[in-house]
Image (cartoon, rainbow, N blue to C red):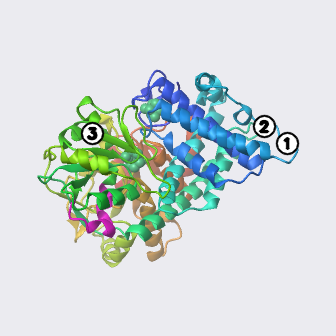
Amino acid sequence: MFCFQCQETARNTGCTVAGVCGKKDNVANLQDLLIYVVKGLSVVRINLGYSNDAIDKYIVDALFTTITNANFDDQDIISKIKEGLALRDQATPTCSCGCSVDLPDCVTWKPENDEEIIAKANSLDVSVQATENEDIRSLRELLTYGVKGMSAYLHHAMVLGYDDKELHKFIRKAMASTVDDTLSGDDLTAFVLECGKYVVDTMALLDKANTETYGHPEITEVEIGVRNNPAILISGHDLKDMEQLLEQTKGTGVDVYTHSEMLPAHYYPAFKKYDHFVGNYGGAWHTQKSEFESFNGPIVMTTNCIVPPAESYVDRIYTTGVVGYPGLKYIPVDENGNKDFSEVIEKAKKCAPPKQIETGKIVGGFAHNQVFALADKVVEAVKSGAVRKFVVMAGCDGRHNSRNYYTEFAKALPEDTIILTAGCAKYRYNKLNLGDIGGIPRVLDAGQCNDCYSLAVIALKLKEVFELEDINDLPIAYNVAWYEQKAVAVLLALLHLGVKNIYLGPTLPAFLSPNVANVLVENFGIGAISTVDEDIEKMINQ
Ligand code: FSO
Ligand code: SF4
């Protein structure tokens, strides 16, 4: 195996024996093959002009499946590979163009059995390392990871019935470009930058899907203690799962709590009507082992990030959507988009109530609509100098102790600064009680990582209000924490919006070759974080 798609990759170089995330060698190779199949299907759709919504849906699903901490199940990935090959082979014979096109191996390769699938997965053909030139490899992977993140967000929108053909078209074009040896580094760089535009469009579509379906997030105090009822914990990002679980648990005596990236579900008006929707339990994804153990009741993982489960709760953790882990129970979706959580609810009734691990409340719900409602107050605070700077600290949290930097950075920020956040990065500082400035909390949480879109909308609005030419003239600094490929997508979106001088940490991506990293530094001023003191000086005081 060779995988370097996330921030925790071994030695910040690449996982080669097993993933730091727990992904086994065979699963990593099968995921590479799944991406290879996606590339083949993308070429088929482009070169053979074959049109099929099932292929588009499949491509988005497969890309999301390979995101860090989503799917660890080799058998599930083998079935997805076979499904993709079947779609590809149904598409290929319909070609009536005479096919003078020189089709790559990802289109023409046909396995006879599972052994051949496994052998192909283990071959260099499908590995990231198949591309010898390190800059081309870097650009191909940067594009692939951006498209993976974009697909995750598109998947969420599609679940809610929102879609846009142009987004699928770009995904196909981008994935096909990664097997086109005629493309230069400049061509691929153009694709990478174009990806940012489509990520913005995808996040806008998902924002529309979420807000039209569940209302606009509003300021909300979320309980972090527990009640004395049996309960279910729901994690991940899928709001439709959230809705269905809340509906099905109504009147059962079973409470529902959110974990990690599901916390922002509390901010949506549609979910406030459920009395048994109690609060948030625990912190970010990487603290799940001890929190799932002490929660006592069943856990539903709707998307990443799942980590290999401990024995103590293996019989009460359920997966759904693209999430997979061998031996865990899976909740399927029916043809109408419905899921039956009755088994989880029955399980909950037999479990003890959650053990209390903390008490108090956290505040969130500062997505664009809510911030616009406070616009006068915010603008006045900036004009009067009460707020000197906003710092976007959005993104991901992770296991490494180096991420304590973000807690220390938040604590060290001068009191006339406000943190704008989204994603699970917030757990490094959202319980610090950093106070408020004239009633505006110093940590404004817009929501999940996809709600970084809200932060961009807020920035653009401020630019308009202050009549500025350039988004970079706003008093906003960017100190973004990344972990997995959705954060890569968000970074490309920020670059597309013209944001410069983003600090990225805790380390720069291993998949950036020195030359590609230089392009990002020279053209966009992207930089690595250093020490808290130095960074406060550079980001706030200069
Ligand atoms: Fe966090 Fe995981 Fe939302 Fe990521 S839970 S790390 S960027 O998957 O998706 O923020
Ligand atoms: Fe390693 Fe990250 Fe890949 Fe997992 S996803 S194998 S930790 S690089």
Q: Identity of the amino acid at label 3? A: Arg
Residue 362 lies left or right of residue 420; in this view the side is left
Q: Which residues fall within the magenta stretch?
A: 263-277
Between 32 and 318, the one lying in front of the other is 318
Q: x%, y% of residue 21?
A: 40, 32
**Residue at the location (29% across, 47% down)?**
344
Q: Are marks 1 and 2 in contact (CB under 8 Å)?
A: yes
Examine the structure image and report whether residue 306 is included in the region drawn in magenta: no
Q: Label 3 vs label 1: CA separation?
A: 52 Å
- When asked about the image quadrant of residue 194, the answer is bottom right
Q: Label 1 vs label 2: CA separation?
A: 9 Å
Q: Identity of the amino acid at label 2? A: Leu
* Front: mark 3 or 1: 3
Q: Is residue 505 visible?
A: yes
Q: Is mark 3 within 8 Å of ligand 1?
A: no
Residue denoted by label 1: 99
Between 19 and 112, the one lying in front of the other is 112
**Residue at the location (41% across, 59% down)?**
451
